[in-house]
Amino acid sequence: MKKDDGLELSGVKEIARRANVSIATVDRVIHNRSGVSNKTKNNILAIIQELDYQPNILARRLASKKLFHFVILIPAISEETEFWKAPLNGIEQAESEIKQYGIKIEKYFFDQNDKRSFVSQTKKILKNKVDGILMAPSFIEESLEFIKACQDLKIPYVFINSDIPSQDSLCYIGPELFHSGYLGARLANFAIKDHGKVLIINISKEIDNYHHLLRKEEGFRAYFQDNNKKNEIIKADIRQTDYNSVASLLDELLTTHSDIGAVFVTNSRVFSVAQFLEKSSIKNIRLIGYDFLQENIEYLKNDVIDFLICQKPQEQGYRGIMALYQNLVLDVAVSKTYFMPIDIITKENYLFYRN
Amino acid sequence: MKKDDGLELSGVKEIARRANVSIATVDRVIHNRSGVSNKTKNNILAIIQELDYQPNILARRLASKKLFHFVILIPAISEETEFWKAPLNGIEQAESEIKQYGIKIEKYFFDQNDKRSFVSQTKKILKNKVDGILMAPSFIEESLEFIKACQDLKIPYVFINSDIPSQDSLCYIGPELFHSGYLGARLANFAIKDHGKVLIINISKEIDNYHHLLRKEEGFRAYFQDNNKKNEIIKADIRQTDYNSVASLLDELLTTHSDIGAVFVTNSRVFSVAQFLEKSSIKNIRLIGYDFLQENIEYLKNDVIDFLICQKPQEQGYRGIMALYQNLVLDVAVSKTYFMPIDIITKENYLFYRN
DNA sequence: TAATATATCGGGTACGTACACGTAATAGGT
DNA sequence: ACCTATTACGTGTACGTACCCGATATATTA
C-alpha cells in the first residue's frame, strides 16, 4: 500500500504547477526571500492558503544544511544536591530525539553558589554561534544582563525552573510557586488537623534564590488564612546548609516551641531535617518537603517524610529543549508559560513516579 | 554553518565505499533482503557495526512509500462517562505529530456495555490492512479471541488502561491497580485517622470490568492490613449506575452504618456518590475516587470530594500510539510494561494537572 | 545606442534512503 | 555447445525541499 493512496496532491510542486511558476519561485515565497514580483508572490501565497500547504518536515530538514545550535545554561550537579541531574536527563532525552534533525546542544554549567561562574559561562556562550538558549535564571541581575545581550543578538531564550517575568522570554517552563506552597499547607493541615504549630523552613545559602522560597511561603500562609486555620506559623531561615547548622537550629526551635506538629521545608533540602528528626527519635512531627531525590525518598520510605511535592524537573528539561525545537525548527508557536503539575509523592506512590 | 562541520562520514554511501560495493547492496543487507553473498553481507555488517551506523530517519521515511496503518479499538465516549475522551485526545495528539511520517490511524469504538459491539468491531478491523493495534481489552474472552487472530496475522498490539498479562502484547500502558487502591487507602486513612468505618464502592454495570475494581480493592484492604489499622471495611457493589440506584443504596448503607468516616469509590463514578452526599447535606464523610472528569472536579472544588486519583489517561493514549510508532517505524525496542504514575489530585493542585 | 545594472524567474543538483530494473557471471540441464 | 535459472550485484530514479547558478527581460546609465 502506497503513501499516495489518498490521491491528495500538495507540496511545492503542486503549488508551482497551479501558479504556473517554477519550484524555485515557490520556494522563494515560502522563505520570504527576494526576487519575486508582488503579483506572483500574492498569487502563490493565495494558493498556499487554499491548499493549506504544510511543508514536509522530513524533506525540509533533509535538504537543509542548516545546523541548529542550542545552548543550555543550568546549575552544575553538586554534592550538595543532585536536583539538576533530572533536568539534565530530560535535556539529554530531548537531544537524542532531535539530534538527527540537525540539532546540536552545547551544555554550560555554573556553580549555584557563585555568581561569577554564571557570568563567565554567559561570556563563553556568546563567543560561538547560538540559535537558542535554555537557561535557569538563578541570579536575577546577571541573568538580566545576559538576556539583554541575547535580545541584541536576536537569540531566543527559554527560562526553566524559575522565572523572571515580563522579560520577553520565548517561554517559561517550571513551577507556579504560590500554589505549590499552598498545596504544602494543605498537606500539612491534613497531617496535623487544627492542632499544633507549623514550622516553615527555608534552607538556602544563596540569597538570590530566596524570592523563590518566599513565594512558596506566601502560598503556604495563604492557605491557613483562606481556610481560617488558627495554627500558629513559625518561620526559620537557615543560611548554612550543612547538617550541623540545620540540626542545631532545629534543636533550638523545638525546645522553644514544644508543640510543633508539622514542618514544611520549602525546597529539596528536607532530607537534612528528616535526618535530624530520625536521629533525635522524634516521631510526632509530620514533615513535608520538595523533590524526588534519592535521599528524600529514603526518608519517605521510613515514614519520616510524609509528603514530597515534586514538579517533574526532568520533564522541565525535556520540554525546554522541545520548546526551542518547535519554535525555531518547526516554526510552531509555543505558549508563553507552561506550569508544571504540582505532584504529591507519598510512600505509596513513589514507585511509579516519573520525574 | 553547515551540517557536515563535524566532518563525520557515515550513511550508506560511506558503507558502500568502504565495502567496495554499491549502495543498493548495502541497502539489501540493511533490510535483510536476498541477493547478497554471505561474504559481502558479513563484510558489510562488520562495517555497519564499526561505524555504528544509524539510518537517517528523515531520508528513510521520505524515500519509503510505505504507509503504516495503525488501528485503535477503545470504548466510545458515552453519556455515562467521558473517561475515554482523554485517551482519545492523547491518540490524536500523537497522530498529529507522526502523520507526516506516513502513519494513518484508523479509529474503532465499541460500547462498553455491549460485548457484541466489541466483537463486530474486531471483525471490521481485520478486513483491512493493519500494521499495529492499540486496544483496551475490556472484555477478556473476546479480546483473547481477537489477539489470537492478530498473532496469526503477525500484527503487534498494545494494551491500554487495562492489561491481560502474559498475552505477548507489545506492551501494556496503564495503571498498576493494586498500588492504586493501596494509595486510596492511605488517603482515606489520612482523612479519617484511625476512627470510623470505611466504605468501598464498586459502581460498574459490566461484570467484565469487575476484576479491575477487585484488584484495587485488594490494594485498598492490604493497606489497612499492612499498617494494622483496625477500621472496619464495608464493601458495596452497585450494578445500576444511574443516580437513583446509587442514592438509594447509599441511603440504606448510611443508616445501617452510622459511623462511616470515608468512602472510596473504585472508579470515575465517584461523582454520583458526591452528588448524594451534597444533596443529603452530609459533610462529615470524606470521599476519595478516581479520574479527572469535569464532574468530579466540581465536587473537588466544593470540598465534597477530598482526593481524586488519576493516572493520566491522555498520556496513556499518546504513549500507546508512540509505542507502536517506535517499535514499527523506528525499529526501537519498547519496554513491556509502562505503569502510569498514580497521581493525587486535590482542590489545591487540580488547576495544574495535565491529564 | 550600447553597455550595464536590476528584477524576475527556471534548471538542475543535492540531502540520504528505498527500490525497480537491468546486467553480468555462474550453475545446471539437455 | 547452447539455453535457461539463479545468484549477485550496479544503475538510476524517486521522495519533497533547499538553494546555487544561470538565463531572460526590463530598467538605468553613459
Image: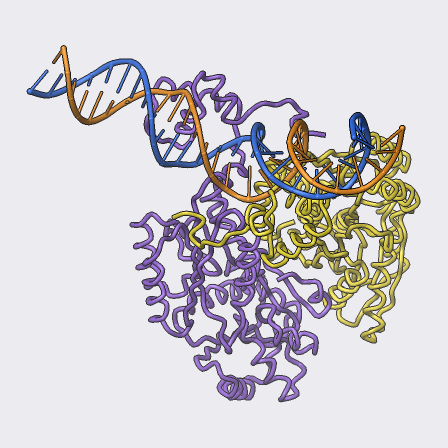
Chain colours: A yellow, B purple, C blue, D orange
> Dividing the picture into quarters, in which one does residue A26 lie?
top right
As drawn, B284 above or below B268: below
Q: Which of A304 and C21 is in front in this view?
A: C21
The structure residue drawn at horizontal position 71% and vertical position 70%, both measured from the top left corner, is B347
Asked if one can make out residue A117 in the rendered structure from this viewpoint, the answer is no
Identify the image quadrant of the N terminus of chain B. Answer: top right
**Image x and y of residue B243, in percent:** 52, 85
> Dividing the picture into quarters, in which one does residue B126 lie?
bottom left
Please give the count of numbered marks on the rendered protein: 0
Asked if one can make out residue B308 in the rendered structure from this viewpoint, the answer is yes
Q: Which of A23 and B191 is in front in this view?
A: A23
Does B103 sit left or right of B258 as displayed? left
**Image x and y of residue A205, in percent:** 88, 44
**Image x and y of residue B240, in percent:** 45, 82
Does B163 sit left or right of A107 as displayed? left
Q: Which of A318 and A178 is in front in this view?
A: A318
